[in-house]
Image (tube, rainbow, N blue to C red):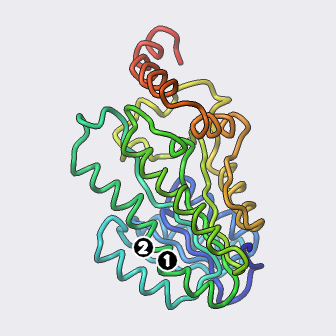
Amino acid sequence: MALPPPAPGAPVVVTGASAGIGEALARELAARGHDLVLVARRRGRLRSLAKELRERERVDVEIRPADLADARQRRELAAELAALEPAGLCNNAGIGSFGAYVETDPEQLGTMVELNVAALNDVMAAVLPGMVERGEGAVLNVASILGHGPQPHNAAYAATKAFAIALSEAVHTELSGSGVSVTALSPGPVRTDIYGPSEAQGLEDLGPDVLWQEPEEVARAGVDAMERGARTSVPGAANALAALGGRYLPRTLTLPVQSALTAALPYLRRHLGI
């Protein structure tokens, strides 16, 4: 139950590959010798990254520009990937939503659910049967430590990541003995460009640097977990503790505390500089 060694004709698919964790995953996999299929909306960014990785790492890299929040494009990509027989899949495409649920644009919420939930499910469902038939393969679903418990003022985003975690861990268990693994990767705060599309620019530098990780660090942990065939991976000791707290502490305690902290963030930033 692990990502197979690099082999011709057995690429790893990376969605959301044009920036952030997705781009870092592509670089990490290419550095380990894997051919790639890169999926994202921004054709120019994909072309540039593919050219760089082909020249530097001497691997085969194909691009598939697609908006996975669009159901039609998602179906077309899923059908293509099912026939491709990839050795691995990194489901990374996603956006965030920060703030009170009732104050968030319903259209933005719908797009986030399409991308973070429906796209993750549809792409994984397309490639897993072939992996099981071949007796090898690995899927990495990028979740978040916020998915390990309900998050006031981050409710819908955390719920989409809870879906990714629950689905990954359950399917991983179902596939025991098949040679195929499904890993939930739950990073904490990562310095990526997700905050702009999520209309949460004010969170980009929130908190001390020790709490933040770089995309390369998260990608390395994710690919390591795929190679081990791990059920779950939470990079960083502080994040692992936060995930455990989200899972096991009583919600009658954690929900009011989380709500109060989130409400206090503007004051803390203004007066304490965090």
Circle 2 sits in a helix, a strand or a loop, which is it? helix
Q: Is 268 placed left or right of 137 in the picture?
A: left
Type of the residue with mark 1: Ile
Q: Earlier in the sequence, mark 1 or mark 2?
A: 1
Residue shown at the point (70%, 73%) measured from the top left: 176
> What label sits on residue 257 in the rendered view?
none
- The residue under label 2 is which amino acid type? Asp
| For residue 164, above or below residue 75 | above
**On screen, 86 above or below 253?**
below
Q: How would you rate the neighbour count of disc 1 (Cα within 10 Å): few for under 14, some for 14-19, many for 20 or more?
A: some
Q: Nearer the viewer, mark 1 or mark 2?
A: 2
Relative to 176, is 256 above or below? above
Name the quarter where the N terminus is drawn. bottom right
In the picture provided, is 87 more to the left or to the right than 32? left
59 or 52: which is nearer to us?
59
In the rendered image, which residue does mark 1 sit on?
63
**How many numbered discs sit on the rendered protein?**
2
Coordinates of residue 205 in the picture (x, y in percent): 52, 29
Question: Which x, y percent locates residue 257?
Answer: 48, 21
Q: Residues within 10 Å of mark 2 (few under 14, many from 20)?
A: some
**Residue 139 placement: quadrant:** bottom right
Q: Residue at x 71, y 56 (%)?
A: 220
Distance (Cα) linking label 1 and label 2: 19 Å
On the image, numbered disc 2 is attached to which residue? 122
Question: What residue lies at 51% left-to-right and 24% top-to-bottom?
Answer: 253
Q: Secondary structure at mark 1?
A: strand
